[in-house]
Amino acid sequence: MAHHNPFCLGNYDFDKIAHYARKRFIEGCNTNELLQGAHSLRQRQEIALVSFMDIENDSVENLQLSCQYTEQCKVTTCRSVIKEIIENELH
C-alpha cells in the first residue's frame, strides 16, 4: 500500500522515502552513502527529506526550504509522515 501525504505538494511517494529511511536508520547507511547511490534529482530530494530526521524538531521547525512549495508546505509535515511509517515498521 502506497503511503501518500495529502499535504505534500511535492507529491512524494512516502514508500520510496521510507526505503531510504530504512537504509539510513535500520541498516546504518549514512546520508553521504545514500546520496552517492542516488541516480536522479528526485532520489536526492527523497534522501534529503530523510536526513531531516536527524535534526531535533525545534531546530527544524522554522527551517525554510528552497523549494517551489516552501510557502505552503512545512518540512515538519514530511518528517511526521516518515517517522510514523518507520515507527509502524519497528513495532
Image: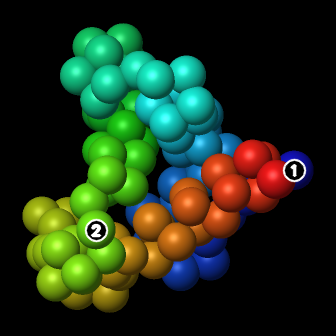
Kindly tell me whether residue 49 is visible in this rendering. no
Q: Which residue is mark 1?
A: 1
Residue at the image point whose x is 38% and y is 76% from the top: 76
Residue 5 picture quarter? bottom right
Q: Where is 62 relative to 49, above or below? A: below
Kindly tell me whether residue 26 is visible in this rendering. yes
**Closer to the observer: label 2 or label 1?**
2
Q: Position of residue 50 (x, y in %)?
A: 40, 47
Q: Which residue is mark 2?
A: 56
Tell me if 61 is positioned left or right of 45 in this view: left
Secondary element type, mark 2? loop
Q: Amino acid at mark 2?
A: Glu
Q: Where is 88 relative to 45, above or below? A: below
69 and 30: which is toward the camera: 30
Q: Amino acid at mark 1?
A: Met
Residue at the image point whose x is 29% and y is 29% from the top: 31
